[in-house]
Image (cartoon, rainbow, N blue to C red):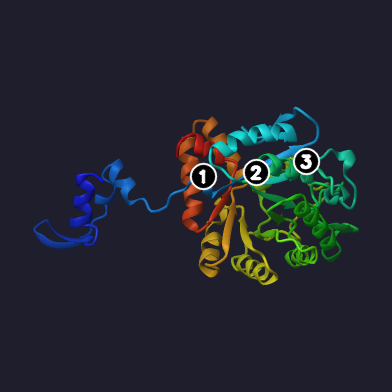
């Protein structure tokens, strides 16, 4: 701590109200500029800091060998075959990022109406989990549990005509979670937004005596910011949209109610998604459920806007994502799922 910081702490930090003479009159007002007069002082007073251990880094995996497929809508992000994923993980782990979230991306010919490729014990995700645990046992693996990547119609649940059948979807989501857990996943993360999905997963895991934890996508809003992800994962619905099961962003209380319901069903961690446009929900959740670990997902569209804004010369990218990630943590998130995790650490931020 430099001399200036010492002086500020001893003389001013506990007494922000100072007397001064203004136009010959006695004036009492708060002085805060002293807390930001130079970089060293700003650094001293910063009370929200983001670090590598705060991050969960998403990976998209594909079948095959030697596959690295850049994703057009997510600059800097690629799909990896398992062998190339292991190579990329060497850097990720070296950067101090020890938590990852896996999404399986399969070809259309492997998809069917019931998403059976998702709950095959030798599925793409299961094989990836086993390979990662063999080579990087210290990495905490989260796996996405949903039907949208594996169904021919691209919806997150089974269909009844053109409606999503909530209750018939639950056993299949549970089966996906089970095979992922049996492969060695540390967390299963159901993102389908089916009512009762946490209870269904907890019951099947308990029945098989597995201690795999559940990260609930509790407050997941129907958002326009998911567009690049659907391209990356090949999971866009073939008709309609997901507004009947994902949350309406015009509601202010349902997110907290959904989080409470997931906790009641046994969720170990909960999540708000997206993050940047829902900082109010993150903040409210952190206050309402202070003992429950809270994650927030800076989604593909939020990432892409920062990337594209920087490419257009509208913002400084490093400062943009630093500010964005800090805001998410400041709102109350314990962990942040973000495509910026590696860039953040590489830049020494």
* Callout 3 secondary element: loop
> Residue 27, located in which quarter of the rendered image?
bottom left
Nearer to the camera, 209 or 55 = 209
Query: On the image, which quarter does residue 229 sit in?
Result: top right
Q: Earlier in the sequence, mark 3 or mark 2?
A: 2
Tell me if label 1 and label 2 are in contact, CB under 8 Å. Answer: no
Residue at which label 2 appears: 58
Residue 160, position as x, y percentages in the image: 90, 60
- Is 253 situated above or below 298? below
* Point 73% across, 64% down: residue: 198
Q: CA distance from mark 3 to mark 1?
A: 26 Å
Residue holding disc 3 = 105
What residue sits 73% from the left and 50% below the top?
184
Quadrant of the image containing the C terminus: top left
314 or 319, which lies in front? 319
Of callouts 1 and 2, the N-terminal one: 1
Labelled pair 3, 2 in contact (Cβ < 8 Å): no
Q: What percent of the width, then of the height, locates residue 126?
A: 78, 46
Label 1 residue SS:
helix
Outermost residue to the top = 66
Q: Which residue is mark 1?
A: 52
Q: Is residue 26 above or below residue 179?
A: below
In the orientation shown, which residue stands out farthest toward the bottom? 264
Query: Which of the pair 215/222 is nearer the observer?
Result: 215
């Amino acid at each position: 701590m430099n001399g200036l910081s010492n002086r500020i702490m001893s003389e001013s930090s506990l007494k922000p109200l100072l007397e001064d003479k203004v136009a010959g009159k006695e004036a009492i007002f708060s002085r805060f500029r002293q807390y930001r007069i130079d970089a060293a002082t700003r650094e001293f007073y910063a009370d929200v800091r983001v670090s590598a251990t705060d991050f969960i880094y998403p990976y998209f995996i594909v079948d095959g060998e030697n596959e690295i497929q850049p994703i057009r809508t997510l600059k800097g992000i690629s799909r990896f075959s398992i062998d190339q994923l292991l190579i990329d993980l060497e850097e990720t782990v070296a950067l101090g990022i020890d938590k990852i979230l896996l999404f399986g991306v399969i070809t259309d010919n492997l998809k069917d109406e019931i998403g059976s490729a998702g709950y095959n014990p030798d599925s793409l995700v299961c094989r990836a989990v086993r390979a990662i645990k063999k080579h990087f046992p210290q990495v905490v693996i989260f796996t996405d549990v949903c039907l949208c990547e594996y169904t021919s119609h691209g919806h997150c649940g089974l269909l009844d005509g053109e409606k999503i059948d909530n209750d018939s979807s639950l056993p299949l989501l549970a089966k996906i979670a089970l095979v992922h857990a049996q492969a060695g996943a540390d967390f299963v993360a159901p993102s389908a937004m089916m009512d009762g999905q946490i209870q269904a997963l907890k019951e099947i895991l308990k029945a098989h005596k597995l201690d795999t934890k559940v990260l609930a996508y509790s407050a997941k809003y129907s958002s326009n910011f998911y567009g690049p992800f659907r391209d990356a994962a090949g999971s866009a619905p073939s008709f309609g949209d997901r507004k009947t099961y994902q949350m309406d962003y015009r509601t202010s209380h349902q997110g907290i109610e959904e989080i409470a319901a997931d906790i009641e069903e046994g969720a170990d961690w909960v999540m708000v998604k997206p993050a940047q446009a829902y900082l109010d929900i993150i903040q409210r959740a952190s206050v309402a459920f202070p003992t429950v670990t809270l994650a927030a997902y800076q989604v593909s569209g939020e990432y892409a806007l920062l990337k594209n804004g920087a490419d257009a010369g509208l913002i400084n990218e490093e400062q943009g994502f630093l500010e964005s990630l800090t805001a998410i943590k400041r709102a109350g998130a314990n962990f942040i799922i973000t495509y910026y995790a590696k860039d953040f650490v590489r830049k020494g931020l």
